[in-house]
Image (cartoon, helix red, strand yellow):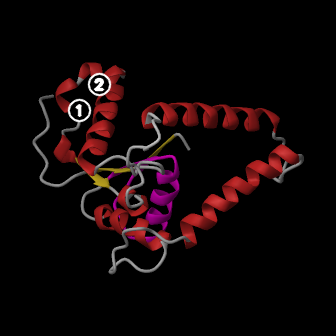
Amino acid sequence: MGPTAPRTTPTILFVHGMRMHNWEEPELFEHWYDALLALLAKTEWGKRHPQDLPKADDIAFAYWADLFRRPNFDAEATKGFDLPTVRDVYYTFLRGLVRGTDWLAHFDDQGRPRDPAAFFADGLVNQTATYMHNGPVFHPDPKAGDGAFFQVQAPVKARLSGDIRLVIGHSLGTVVAYEALARAPHKVTSFITVGS
């Protein structure tokens, strides 16, 4: 079987997660696209069909990170701190906190928290969900509706139409994509979640 004919409309939709506000859309798309190609190239299918790996035009990207970009949020610190180093330490701490909470937290058979660590973890998840559904955004689209939920759903819904058959969601983007799939008509046949 030869290479597939080029498509005129995307068939794959990427939906990114939270904490991507430091990325501009083209760079974040390229990052995702490169990761997808690297992953697919390692599969048996990708090794047998490298000519059929998706092209950039095969992919739509629901970018919403700019909604959470604070004005001057990433300006360089004025007291001699190296911002990338501070971020590395911060994210290393957060990863350790998540691993520690996961190890310490215990839930019952119904998923209810059984101990203080579980109540702490449950509160974080609850706060995130509440924020995403009700919180303000910094650069709202007046046509999308009030609140973060409608603002984030707008770019996903706009790209979900047409020939999209596969949706890939990362982290909170998984929840965003799932909600969009549940709320709008589509032709999606596959949904892949990453880091969720």
Position of 173 compared to 52: left or right? right
Q: Nearer the viewer, residue 166 or 107?
A: 107
Q: Which mark is residue 53?
A: 1
Numbered label tally: 2
Decide: is 106 above or below 2: below
Is the Cβ of the residue at disc 1 closer than 8 Å to that at disc 2?
Answer: yes
Q: Residues within 10 Å of mark 2 (few under 14, many from 20)?
A: some
For numbered disc 2, what is the local secondary structure? helix
> Which image quadrant: the N terminus?
top left
Q: Is residue 184 magenta?
A: yes
Magenta extent: 165-191
Q: Is residue 40 magenta?
A: no
Q: Which residue in the protein does label 2 denote?
A: 46
Q: Residue at x 43, y 44 (%)?
A: 78
Q: Looking at the picture, how far across and down is residue 107, in whole percent?
A: 83, 46
Q: 64 above or below 30?
A: below
At which x and y percent is residue 35?
34, 32
On the image, the x and y values in percent for residue 117 come to 82, 44
Label placed on residue 168? none
Q: CA distance from mark 1 to mark 2?
A: 7 Å
- Amino acid bearing label 1: Leu
- The residue type indicated by label 2 comes to Gly
Secondary structure, mark 1, is loop
Q: In the image, what residue occupies the spot 12% across and 53% down?
A: 8
Label 1 packing within 10 angstroms: few (<14), some (14-19), many (20+): some
Pick the quarter of the image with the C terminus: top right
Q: Would you say 2 lies left or right of 156 here? A: left
> Against 119, is 27 above or below?
above
User: Is residue 108 something that shows in the picture?
Assistant: no
Q: Nearer the viewer, residue 133 or 37?
A: 133
Q: Nearer the viewer, residue 170 or 138?
A: 138
